[in-house]
Image (spheres, rainbow, N blue to C red):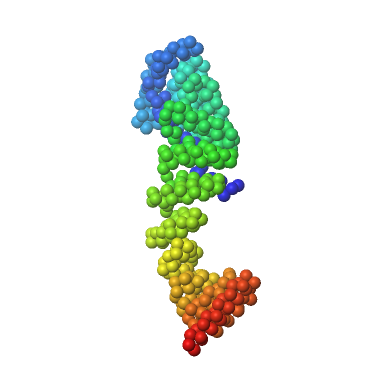
Amino acid sequence: MSKVNAILRAGLLAVPVLALQGGITQLQHTAGLQPFSSATAQDEKKEQETRRTPALRNKVYEKLAEAQAFAEEKQLAQAAKVLDGMISAGGKSELNSYELANVYNLYAFIHYSNEDYNKALEAYENVVRQPEIPLAMEINTRYTIAQLYFVQERWREGINALKKWFDMSETPNANAYVLLSQGYYQLKDYDEALRNIETAISMYRDKDKVPKEQWFNLARFLYMEKNQTDRAQGILEELLFFYPKKQYWVQLSYIYSERQNESRQLAAMETAYDQDMLEKDGEYRNLASLFLAQNVPYKAGKVLKEGFEEEIVEDKSKNWELLAGAWRQAQEVDWAIPAMEKAASKSDSGDLYARLGSIYLDGEQFDKAIEAINRGLQRGGVKRPDNARLVLGMAYFNTNQYEKARDAFRAAGRDERSKDYARQWIKYMNSEIERQEKLAEG
């Protein structure tokens, strides 16, 4: 798994199934009085052509209305008692299929309100088992059955129930495709999940509607799972247009990195920074490192400086070292020195003192350079002691301590990497000493 894939996967929260708010509304609606005689004129005509629905008799209607009233008042036990009476007093044999479907429908609402989803499902399954119920009622109930399976994380059963609904529905909406996609996602069938979420997004785009943020996120995750980073990039760019958030700028930056587009990677992170979206130590350090990689050290220094002032960047040696390096590359030696002093004071290694000595040399603070480098060499852990001794020799030379300078250069020259450079310095120093002696004689 690539680094960017891991980051994006971690950034994508587990995609939950659709909240059952729509299901609650449907349950409340179908439990009311209106559904007993509801359906549009078009639906009624279609149902008459295909089904002959039994009439809802007045005495049954009144009992259902009584149970409905109790349910609306949250007196669920009383509502259930009315329904129990309808079943027990002659029961199923006296109720026609449409009447019985409405009884089970209201039972389902009561069980759902009590968060007994298994009994709610059983009741809804009983609704659709009734022959010759209105087509609209069966279609709506099958969709609710699918939702309840998803609420219980019974993904395969939910998918199968939703497919039955698709078979009956002439105009499935985008939400249904999203729900189906989420089911396949949970089963790790990413091909089917992607196909359905793409359908939902396309349906919204075709109507000039903005797809929901959650839909984009599911599509983005699935594209990354299939290593289609170009498609994931397009989704993130849309997310930023419609739902601008820091996490999308950061994730887009990582995708640009994966595709080796460093300039766009930097632009994405800088945009998040300019919009005050960055709020973590790692984000500030990452942006600074991107500026350094693109040879913009001054901006890197500004970002880190602000991070320290806002107490976002952690007060650690490596972070002060990064700031010192940025200021030094930007030739801001006076700012680099205090940053490296902080870095060295917080480190157990002598290496940062050796590097501090080099910065002191750049700032012509020769005595401080000598002190810092000697401290670093004594402490140990200097990565390139030969370089440190070259700098030490230069500092001694600039303070006219020629013998100490010679010793430092000779020590540096024992390393093959610095041998020629050390020899040149000794030669230069000898000529300079000779020049000064002649001046003194003359």
Query: Residue 287's spot in the image, x, y percent?
Result: 47, 54
- Can see residue 252? yes
Residue at the far front in the pictured view: 442
53 in relation to 363, above or below: above
Q: Closer to the camera, 384 or 195?
A: 384
Query: Residue 428's spot in the image, x, y percent?
Result: 55, 77
Q: Closer to the camera, 16 or 440?
A: 440
- Can see residue 67? no
Which quadrant of the view contains residue 154?
A: top right
Q: Closer to the camera, 427 or 409?
A: 427
Query: Residue 107's spot in the image, x, y percent?
Result: 45, 27
Q: Residue at x 56, y 81 (%)?
A: 430
Residue at the far bottom in the pictured view: 441
Query: Residue 5's spot in the image, x, y percent?
Result: 56, 46
279 in relation to 376, above or below: above
Q: Residue at x 46, y 79 (%)?
A: 367
Q: Residue at x 50, y 21 (%)?
A: 169
Q: Residue at x 58, y 36 (%)?
A: 190
Q: How many marks?
A: 0
274 in relation to 196, above or below: below
Q: Closer to the camera, 322 or 170?
A: 322
Which quadrant of the view contains residue 387?
A: bottom right
